[in-house]
Every structure is written in structure tokens, then in C-alpha cells.
Image (cartoon, rainbow, N blue to C red):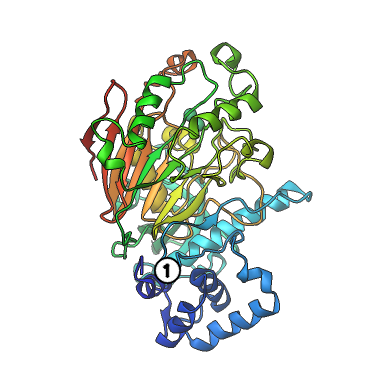
Amino acid sequence: MATNLREHIVAYFEEHHKVVEAGAVDLLLHHRQPLVVSHQVIERAGAERPFVTREMVESVFAEAAAVPAATAGLRPTAGRVALPAPDAEGFQPIHEGYGGPVGAGSPLVAYSALFQSRYRALARLLRGRPELENLRPIREIRPGEPTASVVGMVREVHETSQRHHLILTVEDETGAIELLVPKDSPGTRATFLPDEVVGVRLRFGKDPRRLPRVEAVERPEVPRQRLLGRARRPARALFLSDLHLGSKSFLADEWGHLVDFANGRGPLGDRAADLRYVVVAGDLVDGIGIYPRQEKDLAIADIVEQYAELGRRLAELPSRLTVIVVPGNHDAVCPAEPQPSLPTGLARALPDHVRPLGNPSTFALDGVVVSAYHGRSFDDLIPALPGASYSRPTEVMRRMLQMRHLAPIYGDRTPLAPSAHDGLVLETAPDVLVTGHSHTYGVERYRGVLLLNVSTWQGETEYQRMRNIVPVPARAALVDLAQLSVETLDFSAGEPTVAEAGG
Ligand SMILES: [Fe+2]
Ligand SMILES: [Fe+2]
């Protein structure tokens, strides 16, 4: 098996604080998409039932049999998570954030459903933690008891004027509560971000007029110990991003070096022998009307022509490779996230070995689980996190894993689609998380997850100079899928060079 599926399923239930019977796992192993069913079993079981039995799995199977399309389809619907099949080789879709067009109802109702869905998905990961003693709905919190915990979405944070403590307002489905986070306490180590979901343990003082104090903070996180996917045959994947075709500053010479490499030519050509996948993390073309007076920077001013050029460039990569592309904020799809994959009309310009997916998307490459997200939310997270910078993108990605959310902040620069299901929640912890958008480069390993932010093929533009962004272009991350090791390939100066990457 490409991954030890049994252990992966047990770990999935563990993460959701459920103990799963061996018989239930046996049954799940016979299903083509075991995590789709597991996800449904967990939804059904609710918080009260700590055990998952064979009967519970059977009843989900029975229900699915009544509605065959619901679980039997190859393309998982939003909110459901498939797992690589046993002996998986090749590319396998797991989960796309985009859940279909948004209905015509009231946006207010739709956004409230979106946040409810986020809250529920993330609260499930926090429930049952020993640190969150006496966990209660906010409405049932009574001052006077020594301790209690709540799981809430962060609504507001402000500093008290005199002592620099934090006043934190969190809410759940039953109400909202104001809490005091004392200055220099462990809870203040990480910034609270608007609309993230946290678990907090509280201590109440004798005076009921005083705010409860936050004693401990828990975030959804990725588990410390998990089984990582590994390819069972020699296989490599090349991760790149932000091609910006159509821009005057597209780096055609550097791209040529990359094409030579992928075709096995040049000094690093031997590394391309077992190259099987290329992943492009968005901003495939430069687009039109993305920023003021962009037309000055465009070599191709027509959007259809830009995608035709993208097709020609991707056709230079060997046709035996599977090339996975997700859109970014410069692409011609709805900018609200999660974004759908490229429309058929534009995707038609791409060669057959290209697989367009939505942004974000989770998929397996020879059993290694990859989440790809363009990274628009850097524009909101970097200003919100003290010390964060576009030049160190993996620090922000670490935070995404801690929150298990790719773009929590609502109402700023990242437009969020008002859908009933929050497709930006990281439903399953990936083996690799890849982003772009920053036009810089970074590699890091966090709790076993490989974090990659993979450069750009656009030189510096006037617009970036104005905004003080210094790009680190023409880099790509080459990942050995059997070892989960990574090398940085630098195509920026003639012959490519390889640098051992961090992580
Ligand atoms: Fe970009
Ligand atoms: Fe971008």
C-alpha cells in the first residue's frame, strides 16, 4: 500500500477524539473512499459518542446505497474527504474547497452558515482535549465555579489601556463571552486572529464582576505524531508557482532552463528521470485589470490569448508528466475563495496532461497527500501577525496549519465566497502544503508537514517596486515522494543549480 491505510484511518478518528473498533476499520478499508465515510460517521456520531462501531459504519453505507451518487462518485463533494486507495500510484483527487456556485439567498444568511460550518469543523478537532477541562457551551458558563473551557470563534481582540492585558471576545453557537488574557501569560504568545477558532480554559475569580481569565489556549493544529504518505516507487514532484504568462516580465529564458531540466537535459537532468508530477500553485497568467494601469506591464493584453500562451508553455513539459494547476487571484475565475478550477473554455487551451483543479485543493501523488493553495490570504495574515513578512512565507503557513484554516480573516483583502460549507478549512492534515502568491521562496518542515512556498516566473514589476516587494524568482522545489525529502532548484542564472533546502 502506498500509505498504511489502516493506521491512517485510526489516526483520523483519533484526531476527532473517537476510538474506532477494528471491525469498523475492516469495513472502511473495503470502501473506495474510506475517509468520505469516516467523515460522515463522525458527523453523525456527534460529540457524545466516543466509540465508532461497525454498526455505525454500516448505517452510513446503507444510507449511501439509498443515494448512490452521494458517496460513490469519483469526485468528492465539498466537505467530504477521500483517501488514496490502497496501492495508489499516480494522481488522485481528494478534496476541493470549491463547493459549487453560491445560491441566490440573502448573503447575511449565507455568511452565517459559512461561519457555522467553520466553527463546527474546527470545534470537532478541539473537543475532548484534556487541556480543555469542563468544556461547555458559552451560554452555560457560570462564574463561581473554579474552572471551565469553551471553544469559540475570535470576534474581537483589544488591549486594555493601562496594563496591556488583552480582552478577547469569542463566540459559539449559543452566545459570546468576554475574556481577559493577562499580559505575558502563555495565551499571548501567539496573536489571536479574527475569525479563527480556539479552545480556551478559563479561571474565575471571587468577584463575579471581573472577566474570566484565560489560563490555556488550544488551537486545532496538526497532530505531532502521524503517519506520512510515502511513494512505493521512485517518484518526484516539482512544485512551482506564479507563472504570470502574458506579463512583459515573464522570465522566458529561466523557463527555458526549467523545460530543459524537465526533459532530462543539462547538468541536473538525471534528477528528472523519475519526475512524474508538476504542481503549479496559481497565478498561471497575469490576467487583465488586476491592479491599476496593469496594461502597461502586459505583453499579451487578451485573456484568452494569455491562456493559449500558458498552453504552449506547459506543452513544453514532457507529456508523460501529470501537471496539476490551481488558479490564483490573477486568473480568470471568480476571485472569491474557494475558487473553482479554470472554466472549460479556457482549460481547452491546455495540453491533455494538465489537470486543472480549484483553489484550494487536496490530492494525492503516489499516496503523498498534498494541499495546494495559492496564498491570497498572505495579504491579510502578514499585516495581522507581528513580525511576519512576505520574505518568510513559511512562518505564515505554519500558522495556517495551527489554525487548520487557510484564510480565516473575513472582510479584508481576501474575498470569501458565502457558501454553506467552509472549503478553506484544512479538513485533513496534508503531508505537503504548497502556496505561492508571495513571489518569494521558502521551505520548512512543521510537525512532519513539508511547507513549500515556491517562487515565481515573473521578474520585478513596477507595481511590486511601488509596494516594496523583492521577488525571489525562478526557483522550484523538487520533492522525492518516496523519501519526502526536498531540494531547491535555482534556474535564475543560466545552468540550474541545486541547493539543499531546509526542512
Ligand atoms: Fe503572483
Ligand atoms: Fe497571487
Q: Which percent across, then down, holds residue 386?
A: 36, 35
Which amino acid type is marked by label 1? Ala
Please give left or right for residue 125 compared with residue 297 in the image: left
User: Which residue reaches farthest top?
Assistant: 296
Q: Residue at x 60, y 84 (%)?
A: 59
The structure residue drawn at horizontal position 52% and vertical position 72%, both measured from the top left corner, is 32
From the image, tell me which residue sits under label 1.
148
Q: Quadrant of the N terminus?
A: bottom left
On screen, residue 240 above or below 305: below
Note whether residue 176 is visible.
no
Q: Is residue 226 left or right of residue 333?
A: left
Considering every residue shown, the one lying at the far left of the view is 500
Residue count near mark 1 (Cα–Cα under 10 Å), binned few <14, some 14–19, many ≥20: many
The part of the image, by quadrant, that contains residue 149 is bottom left
Report the number of numbered marks. Answer: 1
**Element type where label 1 sits in the image:** strand
Q: Residue at x 36, y 36 (%)?
A: 263
